[in-house]
Image: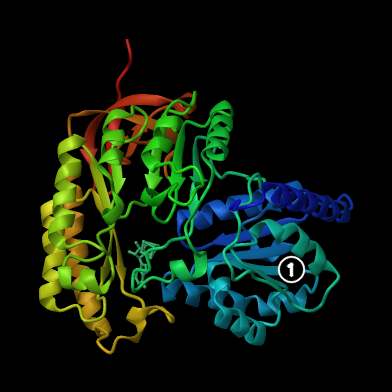
């Protein structure tokens, strides 16, 4: 059976184009403003670029001032409770603004909306919200916005079944040098702490040809770097009717003219194939940077997390990666205080950090997510214990990050210049292939180019250097 009917999806997108026009016509010469606040991961950031693309076609311009906006959108995340609480806080504070300005539209979308209990809570508690939609029907935004104009009642349109992949949604990217590209949606792993498989559905890969077309277009538009996104890119292609591996996709994208660097996120250790390691080694555009979350060091905790590998297997995998890809930069995600984590278990986490020596780590306090198996555990770790462990972990990782950065002193690195630094007019900023931030004195002309820089000073999070003049 055909996995999806592209003809129907094309028709649907055509329909949305009509709504885009209807909204644009309604503007009547005025230029409405939208305020868009995005929570969570790069996937959400990229979804927001699609919202921005649709809004731009509807004649809207962005503002960072809530008070002057005609439309407010929150693109939400539910991976941790803290992000959800923040959204509720923002929604609460908008009530007064909506009362003062009834024509203001408030929309809320993203992962939080894929939870039925969240939607009913918003429906009851935040009645000033105009529009709720989910991740699976993002492309319907123009239609829903249009319908909300003549309605006082809240519009709720969330698809709880896995959405089909809709290609060619307009995109307005934040950057014009680096671009995010989603290569697959959803996750099949069901790590016991994680809500993502429940809200983003099962793994669905985009066709190679669609991805390649998008990357070719980016190359023609002058983009230099792409980051391929998926919850577990190592599973890419397994669900396609013509099977293809992620490594094979990389080989194809490596050929695209104009693109200088290719990155990807996220790799699951249990699925990281030798083929992918060799592709990273052999392909000139694929950067020597691997984000490889280990989550916890103790094999007992890893088993309870349903991660599918032991501490030893993770360490062996890292060794293989380091042997095959010299100079590889490694980053990771770590959860502190998973239910039942003892002091001894936590020592295993520190042990992995000491042995692997990650360039940097994203560290999270375990957050209880209703509906996930770990949330039901009676062995929740007290907050003070979690926080104390978290601080120890941070101190250790920061000192390792700094020590690794110090090895760059006096060395020449190649950076892709991204733009001017936020703090100083003459200082420009770029990244190495290993994703390290480098600041140096440069000129506007450097932006989007590869430059060689001699590192003269290091900090925990960045390197400072001097441009090496090419002869
Ligand atoms: N609590 C804390 N961190 C979590 N993550 C996912 N679920 C949770 C949770 N319930 C972290 C994982 C994942 C990252 C994106 O978020 O480390 O890799
Ligand atoms: Fe969540 Fe695990 Fe899937 Fe990552 S691999 S999105 S942590 S379930």
User: In x, y percent, where is residue 22?
Assistant: 85, 54
Query: Furthest-front residue in view?
Result: 1
Q: Which residue is mark 1?
A: 105
- Mark 1 within 8 Å of ligand 1, using the beta carbon: no
In the image, residue 225 sits, relative to residue 268, either above or below, namely above
Query: Furthest-bottom residue in view?
Result: 378
For the residue pair 112 and 459, the one nearer the viewer reads as: 112
Q: Quadrant of residue 171?
A: top right
Q: Where in the image, quadrant-wise, is ligand 1 located?
A: bottom left
User: In x, y percent, where is residue 308?
Assistant: 25, 63
The number of discs equals 1
User: In x, y percent, where is residue 140?
Assistant: 71, 59
Left or right: where 56 falls relative to 373? right
Left or right: where 102 falls relative to 219? right
Colour mapping:
rainbow
For the residue pair 7 and 145, the one nearer the viewer reads as: 7
Residue at 24% x, 87% y is 379
Residue 184 seen in the current view: yes
For the residue pair 388 and 278, the one nearer the viewer reads as: 278
Residue 422 seen in the current view: no
Query: Furthest-top residue in view?
Result: 471
Residue at 40% x, 31% y is 251
Left or right: where 154 falls relative to 379? right
Residue at 35% x, 86% y is 376
Q: Which class describes the residues within 10 Å of circle 1: few (<14), some (14-19), or many (20+)?
A: many
Where's the C terminus, which quadrant?
top left
- Judging from the image, what secondary structure is the residue with disc 1 in? strand
Residue at 54% x, 51% y is 46
Q: Quadrant of residue 302?
A: bottom left
In the image, residue 60 sits, relative to residue 438, either above or below, namely below
User: In x, y percent, where is residue 172?
Assistant: 63, 45
């Amino acid at each position: 059976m055909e996995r999806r009917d592209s003809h129907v999806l094309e028709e649907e997108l055509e329909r949305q184009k009509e709504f885009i026009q209807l909204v644009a016509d309604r503007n009547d010469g005025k230029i409405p403003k939208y305020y868009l606040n995005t929570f969570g991961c790069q996937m959400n950031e990229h979804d927001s670029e699609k919202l921005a693309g649709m809004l731009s076609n509807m004649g809207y311009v962005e503002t960072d001032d809530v008070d002057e906006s005609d439309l407010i959108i929150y693109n939400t995340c539910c991976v941790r409770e803290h992000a959800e609480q923040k959204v509720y806080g923002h929604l609460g504070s908008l009530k007064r603004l909506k009362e003062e300005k009834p024509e203001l539209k408030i929309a809320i979308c993203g992962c939080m909306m894929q939870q039925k209990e969240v939607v009913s809570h918003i429906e009851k508690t935040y009645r000033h919200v105009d529009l709720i939609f989910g991740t699976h029907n993002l492309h319907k935004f123009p239609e829903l916005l249009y319908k909300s104009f003549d309605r006082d009642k809240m519009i709720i349109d969330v698809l709880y079944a896995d959405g089909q992949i809709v290609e060619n949604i307009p995109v307005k990217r934040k950057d014009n040098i680096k671009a995010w590209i989603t290569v697959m949606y959803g996750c099949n792993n069901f790590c016991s702490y994680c809500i993502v498989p429940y809200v983003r559905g099962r793994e669905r890969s985009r066709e190679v040809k669609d991805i390649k077309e998008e990357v070719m277009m980016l190359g023609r538009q002058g983009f230099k770097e792409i980051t391929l996104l998926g919850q577990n890119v190592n599973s890419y292609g397994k669900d396609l009717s013509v099977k293809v591996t992620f490594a094979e996709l990389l080989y194809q994208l490596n050929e695209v003219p104009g693109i200088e660097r290719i990155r990807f996120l996220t790799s699951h250790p249990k699925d990281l194939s030798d083929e992918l390691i060799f592709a990273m080694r052999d392909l000139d555009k694929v950067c020597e940077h691997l984000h490889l979350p280990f989550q916890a060091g103790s094999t007992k905790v890893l088993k309870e997390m349903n991660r599918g590998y032991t501490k030893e297997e993770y360490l062996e995998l890292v060794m293989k990666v380091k042997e095959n890809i010299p100079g590889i930069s490694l980053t990771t995600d770590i959860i502190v205080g998973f239910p039942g984590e003892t002091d001894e278990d936590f020592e295993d986490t520190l042990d992995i950090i000491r042995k692997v020596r990650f360039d940097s780590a994203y560290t999270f306090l375990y957050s209880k997510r209703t509906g996930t198996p770990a949330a039901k555990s009676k062995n929740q770790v007290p907050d003070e214990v979690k926080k104390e462990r978290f601080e120890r972990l941070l101190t250790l990782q920061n000192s390792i990050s700094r020590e690794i950065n110090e090895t760059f002193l006096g060395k020449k690195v190649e950076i892709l210049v991204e733009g001017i630094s936020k703090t100083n007019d003459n200082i420009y900023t770029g990244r190495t292939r290993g994703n390290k931030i480098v600041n140096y004195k440069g000129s506007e002309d450097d932006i989007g180019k590869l430059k060689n820089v001699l590192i003269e000073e290091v900090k925990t999070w960045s390197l400072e250097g001097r441009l090496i003049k090419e002869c």
